[in-house]
């Protein structure tokens, strides 16, 4: 990442043992403390976003889901009642 693109700044308070551990890890990877923190925080952010924005289904669950999309069940009485209430509220 080019230095010219880095315009934002953040701060974190660390316990002394956390700072020593992070400094050691950064040194082992040949990175500055700042670069190590930014790199690993960004990787963690990407993983967290992926976990919260995508689904992973087992084979059986995937097959049930696809079948429900291809052959949807008829609307239940509760669903029909909900649609009727919605249409009444929406003025249709």
Image (tube, rainbow, N blue to C red):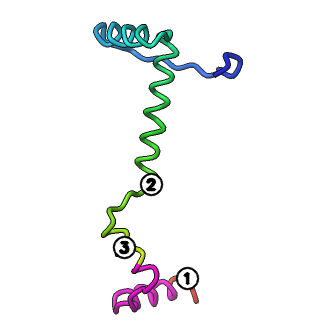
Q: Residue at x 45, y 54 (%)?
A: 54
For marks 2 and 1, give the one nearer the viewer: 2
Is 42 left or right of 62, judged from the image as shown? right
Q: Secondary structure at mark 1?
A: helix
Of mark 2 and mark 1, the one earlier in the sequence is 2
Q: Nearer the viewer, mark 3 or mark 2?
A: 3
In three-dimensional space, the C-alpha distance between marks 3 and 2, rounded to whole angstroms, equals 17 Å
69 or 82: which is nearer to us? 69
- Badge 2 local density, few (<14 within 10 Å), some, or many (20+)? few
Q: For the C terminus, which image quadrant?
A: bottom right
Q: Are marks 1 and 3 in contact (CB under 8 Å)?
A: no
**The N terminus: image quadrant:** top right
Q: Secondary structure at mark 2?
A: loop
Residue where numbered disc 2 is placed: 54
The Cα–Cα distance between marks 1 and 3, rounded to whole angstroms, is 36 Å
Q: Quadrant of residue 12 in the image?
A: top left
Quarter of the rendering containing residue 4: top right
Which of the two discs, 1 and 3, labels the residue nearer the N terminus?
A: 3
Disc 1 designates what residue? 90
Give the answer, above or below, for where 68 lies relative to 43.
Answer: below
* Residue placed furthest toward the front: 59
Q: Could you tell me which secondary element the residue under label 3 belongs to?
A: helix
- Part of the protein shown in magenta: 67-88
User: Residue 74 in the image: x percent, y percent?
Assistant: 40, 92
Residue 31 falls inside the magenta stretch: no
**Would you say 92 lies left or right of 14 here?**
right
Locate residue 7, reporting x and y percent: 66, 21
Disc 1 packing (10 Å; few <14; some 14–19; many ≥20) = few
Q: Which residue is mark 3?
A: 63
């Amino acid at each position: 990442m080019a230095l010219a693109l880095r315009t934002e700044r953040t701060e974190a308070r660390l316990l002394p043992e956390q700072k020593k551990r992070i400094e050691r890890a950064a040194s082992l990877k040949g990175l500055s403390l700042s670069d190590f923190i930014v790199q690993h925080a960004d990787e963690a952010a990407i993983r967290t976003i992926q976990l919260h924005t995508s689904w992973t289904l087992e084979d059986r669950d995937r097959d049930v889901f696809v079948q429900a999309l291809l052959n949807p069940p008829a609307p239940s009485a509760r669903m029909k009642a909900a649609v009727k209430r919605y249409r009444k509220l929406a003025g249709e």
